[in-house]
Image: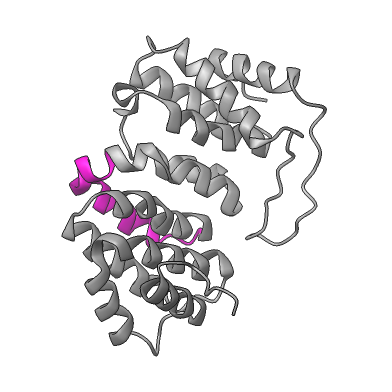
Amino acid sequence: MKPINTHHKEILDLIKSLSDSPTQHTFSDSYLGNSHPRYPINAPTLRAIAKEWIKDHRHLSAGEIEKMLTSLIEGVSSTEKVMAGILLDASAKPQRKFNPKIFDSWLNHLEGWAEIDSVCTGQYTITEIPANFTTWKKILIKLSKSKNINKRRASLALLCSPVRRVYDPQMAIVGFQIIKQLESEDSILITKAISWLLRSMVKLYKSDVQKFISKNQNTLPKIALRETRTVLLTGKKTKSAV
């Protein structure tokens, strides 16, 4: 087995000290889970570990952070992969200045919504994607055309956090372009991500979303249409019970 990064080992030892032995996922559906074992440890505990570890390692460069995250993502357990996303979210802005093309490689080791969304949403995407959108546009389009469904989901998920926080018409244009690229797919891994991206765009791009779903109502996934229309009407994902 490939030797793990020193910082990866530190983090994994902390996870092991606060959990039992890893168990295999019971989910067989590629949307609900993945095929990787996981440690019985909850998300708040993982976030606490990440926050404290990053606090003690502010001196690490972006290159060192990238190597540590790569090692975690290439790790055996789903917990290590999800932890990479939590650490990325907790990192300082200067520590995020690595080459974003690494995401294409990382996604070869991520499977199912939990792993993908942990690494592909959050503070990193809010600060880095809008600031470097010329590069990110090429990455996102490439991912959307991949034969790997996990990469196709990532092309949608990566935009969900920044479009909620940053107004940039170019991001919206690329978001709509990727949705059109993937709208005919029937896997829930994709249809729910299309819905998620459209709903994420409502706050800052409401009129654009309204026009887009009106124009494409016969081709968009039904779940995406239903959930987006509900958000446009009520501001919430689901209608309140009467």
Q: Is residue 143 magenta?
A: yes
Q: Left or right: 224 with respect to 17?
A: left
| Residue positioned 82% across, 27% down in the render | 20
Q: How many marks?
A: 0
Q: Report which quarter residue 99 is drawn in.
A: top left
- Over which residues does the magenta segment extend? 128-148
Q: Left or right: 150 with respect to 97?
A: right
Nearer to the camera, 31 or 92: 92
Residue 107: x %, y % from top left: 49, 45
Residue 122: x %, y % from top left: 42, 42
| Residue positioned 74% across, 17% down in the render | 17
Q: Is residue 3 above or below residue 194?
A: above
> If the image is split into quadrants, where does the N terminus sit?
top right
Most common secondary structure along the magenta stretch? helix
Q: Report which quarter residue 71 is drawn in.
A: top right
Residue 233: x %, y % from top left: 38, 77
Q: Is residue 187 above or below residue 110?
A: below
Q: Is residue 130 magenta?
A: yes
Q: Is residue 180 above or below residue 37?
A: below
Q: Left or right: 167 with respect to 51?
A: left
> If the image is split into quadrants, where does the C terminus sit?
bottom right
| Residue positioned 63% across, 60% down in the render | 31
- For this orientation, the residue located farthest to the front is 242
Nearer to the camera, 150 or 179: 179
| Residue positioned 26% across, 69% down in the render | 206
| Applied colour scheme | one colour
Residue 15: x %, y % from top left: 68, 23
